[in-house]
Amino acid sequence: MSNIKKAGSQALPNKPKRLTDTNLLLLITIVVFLVMYIGAMIFLKKGFLKPQTFFNILNANAALIITSCGMSLVMITGGIDISVGGVVALVSMSCAVYLDYHGGSVFASLLIALGIGLAFGAVQGFLVAYLDIQPFIVSLAGMFFARGMTTIVHTAPFNVVNEGFAALKDTRINVPGLGTVNKLGKYINAYVEIGVIVAVLVVIILFCILKWTKAGRNFYAVGGSRQSALMLGIDVKKTRFLAHLLCGLLAGIGGYVYFLHVGSGSASHAMGMEMNAIASSIIGGTLLTGGVGNIAGTFVGVLSLSTIQNIVSSIGLDQAWWTGITVAAMLCLFLVVQSMIMARKKKRV
């Protein structure tokens, strides 16, 4: 009789694994991006058929990718950080003034960028994690402080002429086999800027941290339920502090990548970047309530946000409000999808 039961149990087919909320949101984000981009290639053609158009999206948004990854880390733990745009502006202005007015070196300017990012991350992380002040309020104060300090460092915008920095800024990395032939019959190599390589490395490293390390599991646990995380023996305060510290560090790195792309210092730099970072994280499948998110999804979210803006511009709707309307519609779509998934999760529980 026991043999019959054993044979019957072995004959039962294995149940298919259910998609996790994180993977489901990532899948939706990838599908939406592919539909948009392939649709643009088919119906709009123009530059979308050229590989360099895709690489230009990466070149222009490398800094946003990095800051959005930092934003996703904080949002996964159930927080938020709206100071990243101000930090990016402060980093670019501080490095520009140091290089041009004080004859600084490129390496030292990079250390300044990392120092500024770590300082903001450490202070804001301490206030949020150990003094239990609302992340929105803390980062709002950080945003105002960073913007004010940017103006104090230097008021007028200017382009950096430091030779070492200019050489680094103009460095291009060719992508073999994806160039195009121009109207004169000359082959033009496809290329990416150094910032794209940095952004891709950041995405890979953070993806590995969240997926395969104890710290990554702690981020999700704290964002899912702080009380449950405490019962599991997780140091919630330390985890929240680490999330904000990494977000600040990534804002510093993103600021330097942004600086490499624009090559100038200005108090108006990176205006609205924090909102774009939040939007990219949400489109990429990171829940505002915490506990769910994926760095790969954030990366695709940035690409989706930029692609929809390029599509609107290619159609001929160059007015700023059209871009705002389409981004808002896209954001609302993903918020509705997230709400449906959360409702499904509650029903399943």
Image (cartoon, rainbow, N blue to C red):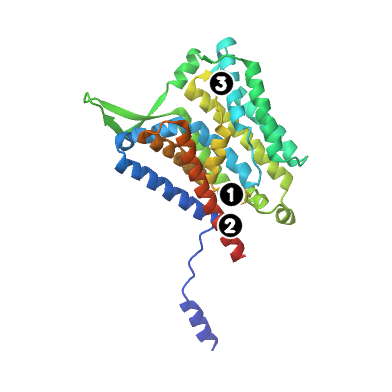
Q: How far apart are marks 2 and 3 (CA)?
A: 46 Å
Between residues 280 and 69, which one lies in front from this camera angle?
A: 280
Q: Are marks 1 and 2 in contact (CB under 8 Å)?
A: yes
Between residues 48 and 219, which one lies in front from this camera angle?
A: 48
Amino acid type, callout 1: Leu
Q: Can residue 302 be seen in this view?
A: no
Q: Quadrant of the C terminus?
A: bottom right
Residue 287's disc is 1
Q: Where is residue 190 in the image (x, y as percent from the top left)?
A: 34, 30
In percent of the image, x 46 and y 36: which residue is there? 323
Q: Please, which residue is most extreme toward the bottom here? A: 1
| Above or below 144: residue 264 | above
Amino acid type, callout 3: Phe
At mark 1, the secondary structure is loop
Q: Name the residue under label 2.
A: 342
Q: Name the residue under label 3.
A: 107
Q: How far apart are marks 1 and 2 (CA)?
A: 9 Å
